[in-house]
Amino acid sequence: MYFDAKKSKVGRNAPCPCGSGLKFKKCCLNIGDAGPPDQKGIDEIYLAKYNIRLKSADDIAAIRKAGRLVVDTLDRVEAMIGPGVTTEQINAFVHRHTIENGAAPAPLNYRGFPKSCCVSVNEVICHGIPGERVLADGDIVNVDVTSILDGYFADANKTFFVGSPSENARRIVATALESLRVGISMARPGNTVGDIGWAIQNYAEGRGCSVVREFVGHGVGLAFHEAPQIPHYGNRGEGIALAPGMVFTIEPMINLGKKDLRILKDKWTAVTSDGSLSAQFEQTVLVTENGYESMTPF
Ligand code: MF3
Ligand code: CO
Ligand code: CO
């Protein structure tokens, strides 16, 4: 449907009402009778302006396949978790299962990361390095898995209870999961990156929790970390307009206490500076014509 820009009261920086995903001023505002750009035009604009590679139907099919392996791996990790299991045992399983399925674990040797997945316990926010730590009853543990299958990347994580959770553990894990859900629900053409962050921040802070600022979601699929960045905080209507074919992660890290973090001497492990519990859930999400499709559904 052709949209008559001249009759509209849409703001210049708002997403274009034609549904292209572009800002109004970059789309129908100035193009008169030419109509909105076709898919090739949108692909070129997103690449030139934002360095975002919109995914083709073939790309999407391949990312979906990688995503199925990631979710299957996380399901099997969940089944093996319990008191007495070491974080290295989780890593060893993720490594073996990934390889056995013809894929490669993206974290291994990524910028010097020494293991095949991240395992983050209690006050560890993210990027925990698997090792000799033994999981104990009452712990919460996040496992973050990224697989490369046929050259395509999918990235997801979940936080699990070890044995019986405390009230605080239940609270932070439930808040982190719902933070992901409210963020994902904003993924559609006509919304912006800022809408996702706003929804997450509004929800998590409304529950008395805090949102980590130093780590963000990211474009993914053709590489581990692509443009754009997806902050888990922000303002409605701000940032890049979402367009069909964008594939990115949403992965809010939510703290029970303050938002601040510090990095341990291993240069990877991020922990809450106040020692409070932190939880995270992550999915890889595709923006479609009408909304979204998760490439890593759970
Ligand atoms: N999987 C993480 C993410 O969600 C990144 C881990 S980087 C690593 O972006 F090197 F620690 F694996
Ligand atoms: Co990620
Ligand atoms: Co991840």
Image (cartoon, grey):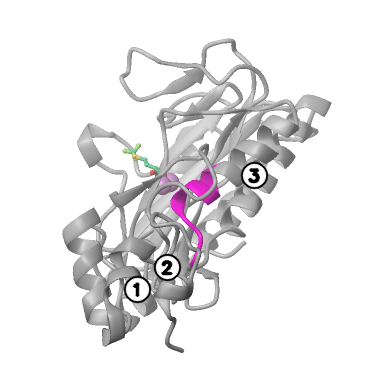
Q: Which residues are magenta?
A: 190-197
Tag on residue 16?
2
Helix, strand or loop at mark 2: loop
Tag on residue 172?
none
Name the residue nearer the viewer: 193 or 108: 193
Looking at the image, which residue is at 67% across and 35% down?
A: 204
Q: Are marks 1 and 2 in contact (CB under 8 Å)?
A: yes
Helix, strand or loop at mark 1: helix
Looking at the image, which residue is at 53% across and 50% down?
A: 195
Q: Tell me the amino acid under the disc marked 2.
A: Cys
Instruction: Name the outermost residue toward the right.
Output: 167
Instruction: Name the outermost residue toward the front.
Output: 7
Q: Are marks 3 and 1 in contact (CB under 8 Å)?
A: no
Quadrant assignment for the C terminus: bottom right
The image position of residue 31, as x and y in percent, is 27, 76
Question: On the image, numbered disc 1 is attached to which residue?
Answer: 28
Q: Tell me the amino acid under the disc marked 3.
A: Ser
Q: Earlier in the sequence, mark 3 or mark 1?
A: 1
Tag on residue 179?
3
Q: Earlier in the sequence, mark 3 or mark 2?
A: 2
Direction from residue 49 to residue 75 in the image, left or right: right
